[in-house]
Amino acid sequence: MRVSRVVTAGLLSIIICFFSIASYSEVKIGVLAPRGPLKSMKRWKNFSEYLTIKLGEQVIMVPLSPADLVTSVKSDELDLVLTNPVHTAKIVKLYNGIPLATLNKKSGPFFAGVIVSKKGSNINNAEDLKGKIVMSLKFKAAAGAYTFQTYHLYQKGIDPHKDFASMRAGKKQDDLVLAVKAGVIDAAFVRSGLLETMQREKKIKIDEFIIVDKRTGDDLNLVHSTNLYPEWYLTALPKTDAKIAEKAKLAALELSNDHPASKAAKINGFVEPISLDGMVTALKALNITPFNN
C-alpha cells in the first residue's frame, strides 16, 4: 500500500510538472541595439527581469540591429518591441503595432539628432556640409542617426545624397564619432546623448568637436542639431495577448526612477505614449517607405 502511494505521488508530481511546462510560455521583446548587442544586454537585462515578474511570464530580451529588428517583426517572431520612433511609426502603419509607452530618459521623453564635425574643420553649419564626406547609420532605418538630420537638412534645401561628396553608412554610432575624430570623414550623424556618454566613457572629449547647427533654448539639455522627437517606444504587436500587452503597459508606467531596471538603463521609467504625428510628417517629407504614397 505504501509503495502504491509513493508511485501515485510520483506520477502526480510528473503530471503537475508536465502541465506546468505545457502552460509555460515566453514573451519575446526585441530591443534595438545601436551600440551593439553586449551594451544592449547590459542596459536592458534588468528591465526584462522586471517585466518577467510583472507579467508572470518569462520575458526574453532579444537585442537586434535595425535591419534584424524589422525582419523579426515581419516574421512574427516578437511579442513586444522597444525601439526608436522611426521604427515605431513603421510598425504601427505596416503591422498594426500598438504603442504602450514612451521611454523617459534622464534628459526627458524627447531626443534629437546631432551633426558632428571635427574642431578646426570649419564645418559649423548646414551649408558647410556641401561637398563633404559624411556618415550616418544605414539609411532610412535610424532615427537620431539619419532621419532627424536628413529632415533638418531637407528643410534647409539640402539633400545629403546629392549635395555631399559622399554619404556613407556605418554600423555603430560610436565608430562614426571616432571616424570624425580620426579625420577619416568630415562629419557624422548621431543621436543626442551619445557624445556625452562617450565622454563619460573617456573615449572622446566633446570640445574636440563642432556641433553643426547647434541648438539651444529648448527642452533638451544635451548637445544637438535638430528638432526634438519622441524617445523610444515600447510597442505591442498584433499577435500579443491583450492581457500581456496591458500588463506590460502598466509595468512600464509604474517603473520608478530608483528601481534597478531604471538605474541600469539610465532612465526615469516611461510615460504615456507620445504622438507620432511629427515623426510621420518627417517620414512623409523624406518619401521614406511606407510613407511614400
Image: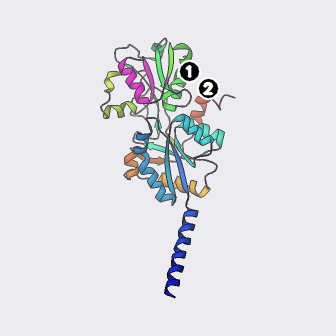
Q: Residues within 10 Å of mark 2 (few under 14, many from 20)?
A: few
Q: Check if mark 2's residue and mark 1's residue have beta carbons within 8 Å.
A: yes
Q: Nearer the viewer, residue 121 or 2?
A: 2
Does 288 sit above or below residue 52? above
Q: Magenta residues?
A: 169-191
Q: Residue at x 57, y 49 (%)?
A: 79
Q: Residue 149 placed where, x, y %?
A: 50, 25
Furthest residue in direction bottom, as rendered: 1
Magenta stretch contains residue 91: no
Mark 2 / mark 1, whichever is N-terminal: 1
Is residue 10 something that shows in the picture? yes
Distance of mark 2 from mark 1, alpha carbons?
8 Å
> The disc labelled 1 sits on which kind of residue?
Tyr
Q: Answer with left or right where residue 161 lies relative to residue 254.
A: right
Q: Residue at x 53, y 68 (%)?
A: 17
Q: Nearer the viewer, residue 234 or 124?
A: 234
> The disc labelled 2 sits on which kind of residue?
Ala
Is residue 215 something that shows in the picture? no
Query: Which residue corresponds to mark 1?
Result: 154
- Classify mark 1: helix, strand or loop: helix
| Quadrant assignment for the C terminus | top right
Q: Answer with left or right where residue 45 lies relative to residue 21.
A: left
Q: Residue 155 placed where, x, y %?
A: 55, 21
Task: Find residue 42 and report its image quarter.
Answer: top left
Q: Residue 192 placed where, x, y %?
A: 43, 32
Does 5 sit above or below residue 278? below
Magenta stretch contains residue 184: yes
Query: Which residue corresponds to mark 2?
Result: 285
Q: Residues within 10 Å of mark 1 (few under 14, many from 20)?
A: some
Task: Find residue 128 and report its image quarter.
Answer: top left
Colour mapping used in the image: rainbow
Furthest residue in direction right, as rendered: 293
